Amino acid sequence: MDYLAIQQDTALWLLRKDGILEELANVIASQGLRNLRKGDFLAGPIRISADRDVVMLVNADFAAGTGDEPLGFIRIAPRLGIASNADAATMALTRAVFVICQRLQNRTFWADSRYRKIDDSRYTISIGGLESPLSLAWAEKTLQAGATITRVVFVIGPYHDENNLAEAAESYSFQISALMNSVRTIMSGNSTRGILSDKSFTSLREAIDPSELRQDAGPFDASGGRLTLTVQARRADVTPQDIYRTLMWSYDQWCNPALSTLSKEQRSILEQNAPLTQPLRIVGPGGAGKTLLMQLMAIKCLREKPGAKVLYLTHNEAMEESVRARFARLLNGAPKHAAQDLFAPISQLHVTTLARYSMELTGLRRWQVISLNPERAKDDAFNLVKEALSKALASKSHVVEKSENLRVLTADETAFRYFAEYVRAEISMVIKGRGMILDRGAYTDAQDALGHLHAVLSPEERDVIYDAYINYRDSLREYEVLDSDDVALSVLGRLMTPQWEYERRQLGFDYVFVDEAQLFNDNERQIFALLTTSQSPHTLVAIALDEAQRLYSMTASGFGRLGIEDLQRRTLHVMHRLSESIAKLAFYVISQGSAPFGNEFPELKFRATDAKERMHSAPSLHVERLEKFAERIYEIVRVGAREGLMQFAVVVHSETAMAPIREGLPKLVHSDFEFRMLRQRGETISGNYPTVILAPPELIGGQEFDCVISCGLEEGVIPPQSIGGALAARLEQQAYREIYLTFTRARHRLHIMNMEGSALTPVLSRARHLGLLKDAG
């Protein structure tokens, strides 16, 4: 391994952190990075991975989520690299990182650094000032892929002869194209290696995050891939009925060690991190207990800091209602007047949606926004985006006919729907988020990759997308409303003023909790850091998220880029919801394709709970004629109900399967079960009587059911086969997340139902071959 790759924001972060570069230099000098052939290093926000000759260090907090980003390569090999001089390794590595940081920002150097320009592409600099005999040299290059240009700085040394070193830098830099291919392989997340043990690189790990809670989850690797999973037996006295019994527990009951079913990890986070002293993120898969932990932490902040103001943000009204109901139960053990005070208009605990808070802050009226309900607002906006995209494709048919990316959209409805979701994200995050609403050329002609979609489109294709934006903007103007991004950007405009900097001491909050943060985009996430009182040296924000549940969107930027730096990372490994067999299948799926360099992608080392009750069974595959889907589903539900299951979810992944189920299932179940179609994410579902829920995958997040029946996971449908080229990989990632999200809703039973004559989507076909999915009897 000869080169270390670092992006500019990560380089700046490393320079600000004492001890990390010294420990990294020691590892390089001792050739310790060879261990990365066995797996990736993961500590706090840092991930270090390897491919062929390249080792890449990424800080997820500063990931831009745009695809190809400017970066630097540092030669670390024994010849003309950091490892060539162990005594000077720390100084040389620090100086090399500094060079990358400066040059990727187009900044120069002070005279006392002995900086010398050889020509327009080659430079040298002393590693220790004017008196040092050793220097570094670097070359600066630009690489073009389609319409996108990536800037690269290539550093070698230390060495005593500047001229020879400069010539070597130019010679070695011709490897950049091959090195970039390795970087793309690493960033794609398709590595088959696992995660290194927490016992590896202990000094470096301690320097990165000395307070990190580390638990080594023993090995499970059914695929030969990079999934690591351990199954931890649930306490013998904890039964499925306890799931319902504990719903009524108070805060004091949850915190009582003699009663509580909190995991060791949850209890440790609650004891160590509340009240908050610095920003915190809680990362974990569905069913790990993130929301409960956040609410317990919020109450603890209020109890231990009398007079403190706490803001608890949810994504939509249904989730707000659920959180409010849980807070009322948790506060049941408190004096009555205290509970009333907490929910008074001027209160210590303010539970609301970000949308409603934004309306209050800006003074916008209901009729001025597309919808006050974020789910409905995004649905309405999506319908307008689809109309706008259709018009744009029709008006630029000559471009569409020549485009591999756009041509298929006019013939395949499923492909069009998937693509429209990415167009909506492009309008939101790039055109609006980056202030390009009045500058078409800034979007179409940009050489830097502004987003994953932008990166794979030609200028002519981008012009079609910008036309879609214009059509969408005109539709909003016709209805005289703002969409959710307009509202978020208006709030940012209000908060980024000297007036708010003065007012936030009175109007801001001491603590801010953000639940299901993966549902908010970058425009909305930028608001979080500006809502605190600013009285603390740190931004006291706690964020809970599972990035694998982020559907239909580009990779989010790291929170460090959005104003929340130095977040502590705490991971919940114990999944209170899933049985062992369901957990193994779900995490096999997500481990096959989800890029590990997303902002907050969950660490793929988990423990699932398993009481080994008769309710549990292995995930099963059913094959049926389409017209018989409803009858087969009803049969599965009846059998489950007889065995004590109460809540059933039918999750449908294709319109072809949805139509007959929507028509036939309500007629079959109405006499024995309550039947509902989910209209928004987070709706409250009663556990008091048998219920059957019908929903698309995008609305199923935040729920849990005794049994999930997943329909339409067929090859060519999930993901759509008609889309090829660079977009195919993005849609494959989307498909893995959609399947993972659906599977992790199930407590005890998981059934998959496909049409007779169809083939399983490839990832499930592989899982079936490995024995993670069984054919139904």
Image: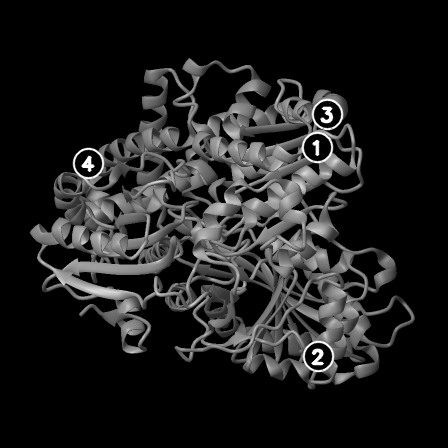
Q: Residue at x 19, y 43 (%)?
A: 398
Of pointers 4 and 1, the one earlier in the residue sequence: 4
Q: Secondary structure at mark 1?
A: loop
Q: Is residue 725 visible?
A: no
Along the viewing direction, whichever of 478 and 715 lies nearer the viewer: 715
Count residues near mark 1 (Cα–Cα under 10 Å), then give few for <14, some for 14-19, many for 20+. Answer: many
Nearer mark to the viewer, of 2 and 3: 3
Q: Residue furthest right?
A: 131
- Residue under numbered circle 1: 532
Marks 3 & 1, CB-CB < 8 Å contact: yes
Q: Nearer the viewer, mark 4 or mark 1?
A: 1
Q: Mark 4 or mark 2, which has the lower sequence index?
A: 2
Task: Decide which of tag 1 and tag 2 comes sooner along the chain.
Answer: 2
Which amino acid type is marked by label 3?
Answer: Arg
Q: Position of residue 180 (x, y in %)?
A: 50, 68
Residue with the mark numbered 4: 394
Mark closer to the chain start, 3 or 1: 3
Residue 578 vs residue 210: left or right? Answer: left
Measured in 3D between alpha carbons, the distance from the residue under mark 2 to the one under mark 3, in whole angstroms, is: 46 Å
Estimate the spatial distance between the alpha carbons at disc 3 and disc 4, rounded to whole Å.
49 Å
Q: Nearer the viewer, mark 4 or mark 2?
A: 2
Q: What amino acid type should be assigned to the residue bearing mark 2? A: Ile
Q: Nearer the viewer, residue 167 or 601?
A: 601
The reply, left or right, for residue 721 in relation to residue 66 is left
Instruction: Kindly identify the amino acid type of the residue bearing the numbered disc 1.
Output: Thr
Q: Residue 513 lies in what quarter of the image?
A: top right
With 578 as the anchor, is 62 left or right in this view? right
The image quadrant where one finds the N terminus is bottom right
**Which residue corresponds to mark 3?**
504
Q: Looking at the picture, how far across and down is residue 709, in whole percent?
A: 26, 54
Which element is circle 2 on? Answer: helix
